[in-house]
Amino acid sequence: MRRQAAQRLVAAAFALVAVLFGVLLVSAHAQASAGVDASEPFSLLSLGGIARAWREFWAIVGPGGKLHPAYFLEHKGHLVIEAALIVVIVYLALQHSFKVHPRAEDPLTEKEIDQLCKEWTPEPLVPTVPESERIEPAVITGIDGPYVYVQGRKEKVLQMAASNYLCMAADKEAKDVSVAAVDKYGVGSCGPRGFYGTIDVHLELEEELARFYGTEAAIIYSYDVATVASIIPAVTNRKDIIVCDEFCSYAVQAGYTVSRSRLRTFKHNDVADLERVIQELEAEEKAKRRPLCRKLIIVEGIYANYGDLAPLDRIALIKEKYKYRLMVDESHAFGVLGATGRGACEHFGLKPEQVDIIAASMSHAMGSVGGFCVGDRTIVDHQRLSGSGYCFSASLPPYLAVAGINMLRHLRACTGAASGGPSGQQQGDKGGSGSGGAGELMPKLHSKIRAFRTDLMRGVPGLKLYGGGVLSPVLHLHVAKPVSEAADAAALRRVAELMLTSGCGGGVGGVLVGVSQYANIEQRRPPPSLVMFVTLGLGDKELGLAAGALRKAAKEVFKQ
């Protein structure tokens, strides 16, 4: 339509020029006829007549002529032009919004519409997954301590694919208080926190979290992935700077993408590269004389994609040196690291005021659902108006909040943790090796982690354990001699399948483990890995069964 309108406009302009030229030529002919002798013949049909008419025409429009622009402007002709421009401006100012005129073409007939619909082939909403990459997830039908029952199998299998670190998901006391909460509040809140979805147990859980971490305030979210993905865009925008590890989890990637901040990544767990990136940013800011903005470093206490620990003590020094803010995702470190289970920050001796934002999932060690953030009251209260996951999602079901409260009180009782600040690793290191007293919960879990990692470090055919003896319950085993991403993933899936189906003896049908999967939209994806989690409910027998099943399956797949 726009092309046709432009063509019409050009044609009209040419027509106008032709008419004006014709008028001027005729007028020149008239003047030439009047100024010559009547006995001298003059006609536009002859070459002499055309030449004479052209001379007369040029005498009118050329320099000194009455239609020349200079003559026109000298006699206040500019007033006419200015008046015309004012009329045009007023006309345009009084016009309403542009209205699209109907197309000049005839509308399609019903037959043509039907034919186009038959010829149209819609693209799939999601890409087609090759048959070799399709995974049938194991369906759990029952739980028996560290074992589970899988659909289609009679024997129980060892559960090592769940991050239920403190076994709170099936804790009897947690189930009892949750059932009582269901009787009192029902199963859902059916409303966001800012309207009619706030229940007293939500406020109680936030108070417990703030008291446990020794911070001014806390806020809970109803979905753990949305927690970090909501916090980051709530505290940063496109004018700010974010520096994060290149292999942060999907939740962090979603958060900084939504924030539209200027992003820089540093090599995985490389503090020297972190400082290099910050120095480059500082030099760039000074060179371009940009105004001050918020600057945020984002790391994970225990990286979900690799299972290693971020060196928070060294990162905190860099943060203070360059005046950055620090955000730590403690999802896999909460309830696992530190003398009292406060996470990697406590493990590295950081005080609450040294970390600006601490976030974590409640679906791992807490055995519940959702996520939380603790920190300064200003930061927390800001999220109540700007955190999309908080403002636009139904609040956490009350019984899950009660389960979280029960877990925090249980953790405080079993670790001897006082309210506020890191109670110090000295307190946890003095704990005994029993199974129930105060101060013994964390050392017991840590001993299981060290024992299993030490066993796997002795060697697994065709696989290598990432992180070695690091104190992390998240274990990623990569292919020792990688071929390609697809081939390595297929081999690892075969290992997991054999571990589940080969049997371990003693009434145990196998070991349930996971294989890492990453979305195509993730900017950086680690290599495929076999994923296992060490939990408090695993004894020496179960850890031995898992290591034996892993070596047996890996030996068969990699023929070593």
Image: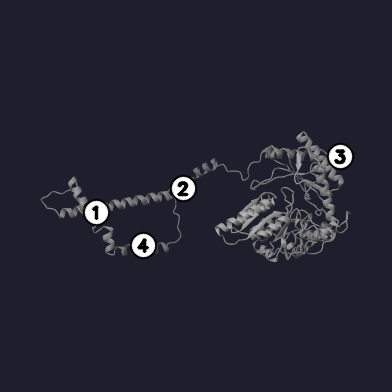
Q: Is residue 44 shown above or below 288?
A: above
Dot 3: within a 10 Å radius of its alpha carbon, few (fewer than 14), some, or many (20 or more) residues?
few
Q: CA distance from mark 3 to mark 1?
A: 110 Å
Q: In the shown orientation, is residue 206 left or right of residue 54?
A: right
Q: Position of residue 410 (x, y in %)?
A: 83, 59
Mark in the foreground, 2 or 3: 3
Picture disc at residue 24 = 1
Mark 2: secondary structure: loop
Q: Is residue 412 shown above or below 15?
A: below
User: Residue at coordinates 20% horizontally, 53% vertically from top-left?
Assistant: 56
From the viewer's side, name the closer residue of 544 and 222.
544
Mark 3: secondary structure: loop
User: Residue at coordinates 25% horizontally, 51% vertically from top-left?
Assistant: 22
Q: Position of residue 440 (x, y in %)?
A: 86, 56
Name the N-terminal-most of marks 1 and 4.
1
Would you name the residue on which mark 3 appears?
505
- Is the C terminus in the top left, top right, bottom left or bottom right quadrant? top right
Q: Is residue 3 shown above or below 94?
A: above
Name the N-terminal-most of marks 3 and 1.
1
Q: Amino acid at mark 3?
A: Gly
From the viewer's side, name the closer residue of 199 and 335.
335
Name the N-terminal-most of marks 2 and 4.
4
User: Residue at coordinates 19% horizontally, 52% vertically from top-left?
Assistant: 29
Q: Amino acid at mark 4?
A: Leu
Q: Position of residue 218 (x, y in %)?
A: 73, 63
Picture disc at residue 107 = 2
From the viewer's side, name the closer residue of 365 and 348.
348
Picture disc at residue 85 = 4
Q: CA distance from mark 1 to mark 4?
A: 25 Å
